[in-house]
Image: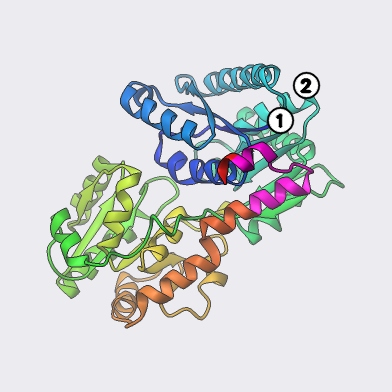
């Protein structure tokens, strides 16, 4: 018997590396026979060395990995094709070895899991994360009353009604799930935020040596990690980082795949930053060289269900954190903290920098930040919450697998 995990995010992508593989491998370590179906970009699959290396790592952890090609041309048709293919693969895997539980990360994966679950009579978990439909509307990707949006809303209601349990990233998001479900239906909702491996993300014992190795000049470092467009506040982020570096004699670092976009905005604003595109496994080293992290997410209504991955990673590496109010549970989590703070989106950059400098010089900043990370974002806590959810659905670890892990 096994657990089949569907992820429409690629295991070879940064998101899959940080928010899929750690949970799948952690659950495997607890004795669950995990099988992962993920959708990988063509460019990633062409890197055969990485594919073979990851396959070997997962096999060593007892995880069966089935990477499928992600299609992106003609998005609606491509996604529909991927959903059908995922369902076919899921049914085939069940014939090879019976599946007792399906676990789907986000909406397209949920449609795959729902289809397979009905065919084989197994329960499934809708790892909804946030409000995907609302996010796409608020970002201008979809129109509020367009045909794609109407179809997605119908699918959303179906997924909430069909699933045995729903996972949300925040308590604010969990409180709003019921309004999206069919009338009279109360989803069985569990809150599990985006978590961080605190053994991998940790402060450096020799920060100056790390900075020298990375080519970062001396002085304090403010950092931003991740996308800058769509759901984020790039201009505020870049102005704050530049002003922090200017006033402290330090540096501002931006780690993003959107290098061209970042440089274009920097030029337009007349400000400076060190911009790099790095692999996810390199992020902990860069964070260990920094002192303050920025998490400026646009506070749209849908973002009440968002838990920015970067926040847990910053805190685990001992960084002070500045974020935007109204995003997920951050206002509650940061209440009373001296090394983490939220501001409204219309804040003046000078006000943010004033507090960032104060937090940077806090004597026990690293200790306080790590404590916050452990309280809210520890990966071990997240894995145990998933295991507890599995057990609540009658799915226990495999005894033979437990013996292998011992």
Residue 349 locus on image (x, y percent):
31, 69
Neighbour class for label 2 at 10 Å: few (<14), some, many (≥20)?
few
Residue lying at 68% horizontally and 55% vertically, measured from the top left: 174
Residue 76 falls in which quadrant of the image? top right
Q: Name the residue under label 1.
A: 1
Front position in the image: 321 or 45: 45
Neighbour class for label 1 at 10 Å: few (<14), some, many (≥20)?
some
Q: Which of marks 2 and 1 is in front?
A: 1
Q: Is residue 379 left or right of residue 144?
A: left
Q: In this view, does 302 lie above or below 157?
A: below
Q: Is residue 358 left or right of residue 342?
A: left
Q: How many marks?
A: 2
Dot 2 and dot 1 residues touching (CB under 8 Å) = no
Mark yes or no: residue 185 visible. yes
Q: In this view, does 190 lie to the left or right of 202?
A: right
Front position in the image: 281 or 137: 281
Residue, far right: 184
User: On residue 119, which mark appears?
Assistant: 2
User: What's the magenta bit mostly, secondary-structure-wise?
Assistant: helix
Check disc 2 and report its element: helix, strand or loop: helix
Residue 401 painted magenta: yes
Real-space Cα separation, disc 2 to disc 1, in angstroms: 16 Å
Residue lying at 57% horizontally and 36% vertically, measured from the top left: 143
Q: Give the range drawn in magenta.
A: 385-403
Residue lying at 32% horizontally and 74% vertically, measured from the top left: 356
Residue lying at 78% horizontally and 31% vertically, measured from the top left: 122
Residue 222 falls in which quadrant of the image? bottom left
């Amino acid at each position: 018997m096994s657990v089949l995990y569907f992820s429409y995010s690629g295991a070879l992508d940064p998101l899959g590396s940080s928010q899929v593989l750690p949970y799948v491998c952690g659950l495997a370590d607890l004795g669950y026979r995990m099988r992962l179906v993920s959708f990988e970009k063509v460019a990633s699959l062409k890197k055969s060395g990485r594919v073979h290396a990851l396959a070997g790592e997962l096999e060593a952890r007892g995880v069966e990995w089935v990477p499928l090609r992600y299609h992106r041309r003609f998005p609606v048709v491509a996604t529909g094709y991927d959903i059908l293919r995922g369902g076919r693969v899921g049914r085939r895997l069940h014939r090879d070895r019976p599946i007792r539980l399906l676990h789907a990360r986000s909406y397209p994966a949920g449609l795959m899991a729902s289809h397979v679950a009905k065919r084989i009579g197994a329960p499934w978990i809708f790892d909804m994360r946030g409000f995907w439909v609302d996010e796409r509307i608020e970002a201008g990707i979809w129109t509020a009353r367009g045909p794609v949006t109407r179809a997605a809303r119908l699918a959303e209601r179906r997924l909430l009604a069909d699933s045995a349990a729903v996972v949300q990233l925040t308590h604010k998001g969990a409180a709003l799930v019921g309004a999206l479900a069919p009338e009279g239906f109360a989803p069985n909702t569990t809150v599990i935020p985006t978590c961080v491996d605190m053994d991998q993300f940790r402060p450096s014992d020799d920060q100056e040596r790390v900075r020298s190795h990375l080519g970062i000049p001396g002085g304090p470092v403010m950092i931003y990690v991740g996308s800058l467009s769509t759901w984020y506040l790039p201009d505020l982020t870049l102005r704050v980082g530049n002003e922090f570096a200017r006033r402290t004699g330090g540096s501002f670092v931006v780690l993003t795949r959107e290098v061209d976009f970042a440089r274009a905005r920097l030029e337009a604003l007349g400000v400076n930053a060190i911009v790099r595109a790095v692999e996810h496994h390199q992020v902990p080293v860069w964070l260990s060289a920094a002192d303050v992290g920025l998490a400026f997410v646009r506070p749209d209504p849908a973002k009440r269900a968002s838990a920015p991955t970067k926040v847990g990673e910053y805190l685990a590496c001992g960084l002070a954190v500045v974020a935007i109010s109204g995003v997920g549970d951050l206002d509650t989590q940061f209440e009373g903290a001296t090394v983490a703070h939220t501001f409204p989106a219309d804040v003046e950059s000078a006000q943010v920098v004033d507090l960032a400098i104060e937090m940077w010089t806090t004597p026990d900043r690293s200790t306080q930040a790590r404590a916050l990370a452990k309280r809210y974002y520890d990966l071990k806590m997240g894995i145990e919450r998933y295991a507890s959810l599995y057990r609540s659905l009658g799915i226990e670890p495999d005894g033979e697998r437990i013996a292998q892990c011992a």
